[in-house]
Amino acid sequence: MKITKQLRSSSAEDLMTRLEEFKKELSKLNVQVATGAVASSSGKLRQTKKNIARVLTLLKEKEVKSI
């Protein structure tokens, strides 16, 4: 809930930056899963995917509002 409030108050440029950060983090986590070294961050992968979806949803909402 806290991250959603932070994201809603961000501008579109900030959201794009956060989206890139989340995608890089997801990529790193996927590599960890592939190599089998993901013992401590099992929930982190799911949370990162959800954060990406949140950012994409907010970007879409901002796009619709601007039309």
Image: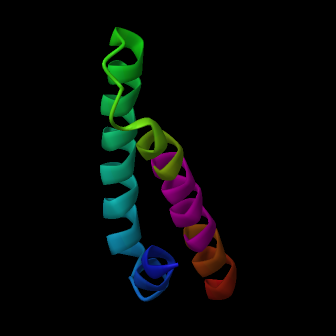
Q: Position of residue 37 (x, y in %)?
A: 30, 19
To which quarter of the image does residue 35 belong? top left
Q: Position of residue 24 (x, y in %)?
A: 31, 40
Q: Is residue 23 left or right of residue 21?
A: right
To which quarter of the image does residue 18 belong? bottom left
Q: Position of residue 34 (x, y in %)?
A: 40, 13
Residue at (30, 52) in percent of width and height: 21
Q: Residue furthest front?
A: 39
Q: Give the image's coloring scheme.
A: rainbow
Q: Is residue 3 left or right of residue 35?
A: right
Image position of 52 with respect to 58: above or below = above
Image position of 9 with respect to 27: above or below = below
First to last magenta residue range: 48-58
Q: Is residue 33 magenta?
A: no
Q: Is residue 2 left or right of residue 66?
A: left
Residue at (58, 80) in percent of width and height: 62
Residue at (33, 35) in percent of width and height: 40
Looking at the rendering, in which quadrant would you find the C terminus?
A: bottom right
Q: Nearer the viewer, residue 7 or 67?
A: 7
To which quarter of the image does residue 14 belong? bottom left
Q: How many marks?
A: 0
Secondary structure, magenta segment, majority class: helix
Q: Is residue 50 magenta?
A: yes
Q: Nearer the viewer, residue 28 or 40?
A: 40
